[in-house]
Image (cartoon, helix red, strand yellow):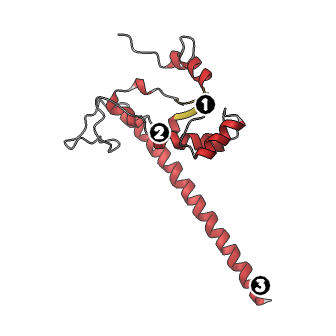
Amino acid sequence: MAKKAAQEAAKKAAQEATKKAAQKTAKKTTDAAKKSRDKFSKDKKKSQQKCNKKGKCPLCGRDNHDRKYYRLKSEVKKTLLRDAANPKSTLDATARAFILKTKGEQVPKGYEVSHKIPLYTLPHSRRCTLDKAWNMETLPTAAHRREHKKCGPTYHKYPPKKK
């Protein structure tokens, strides 16, 4: 009898420890997202930043991207997995299954990972502040293209630069 009670108490303690660890991890990820958003809003007002002497970006630590910016695959992967887990996202069942099967390594056919605030609003050297999962969403290709057409919401909110 005492042995069963001890086992149940140990089981409950293990469940509570697991629950606390999951909450701690979730808090860390939300804190990281908040820091990233805060960093973007603070850095948005600063002038264009150049890489340091070692050729590293002072914002993200990646190699020099003053001339050309390459999107982060890790952030795209986070976005895909987040949207696949969210039942309110625009993904259909087959796209969700595809993302989970490939573990977020590939984008399903007919979908694109889009930035809510487009990268073209900042110079190459500052795009790393926008290339984060909080600023991305997985959309059907047709919906994404509509957003950027002349009457689309993204076009009006962030018009292309006039040359």
For label 2, the residue is 132
The label nearer to you, 2 versus 1, is 1
Rate crowding at label 3 as few (under 14), some (14 to 19) or many (20 or more) other CA atoms within 10 Å: few
Q: Residue at image x 35%, y 10%?
A: 163
Rate crowding at label 1 as few (under 14), some (14 to 19) or many (20 or more) other CA atoms within 10 Å: few
For label 1, the residue is 109
Q: Is residue 7 above or below residue 109?
A: below
Q: Amino acid at mark 3?
A: Lys
For label 3, the residue is 4
Q: Amino acid at mark 2?
A: Lys
Task: Indicate the position of residue 53 as horizontal and vertical percent values.
Answer: 19, 42
Q: Residue at image x 47%, y 26%?
A: 118
Q: Nearer the viewer, residue 133 or 34?
A: 133
Q: Is residue 35 above or below residue 11?
A: above
- Quarter occupied by the N terminus: bottom right
Q: CA distance from mark 2 to mark 1?
A: 22 Å
Outermost residue, bottom direction? 2
In which quarter of the view is residue 97 placed? top right
Q: Amino acid at mark 1?
A: Lys
Q: CA distance from mark 3 to mark 2?
A: 49 Å
In which quarter of the view is residue 71 placed? top left
Rate crowding at label 2 as few (under 14), some (14 to 19) or many (20 or more) other CA atoms within 10 Å: many
Q: CA distance from mark 1 to mark 3?
A: 53 Å
Task: Indicate the position of residue 34 as horizontal and vertical percent values.
Answer: 49, 44
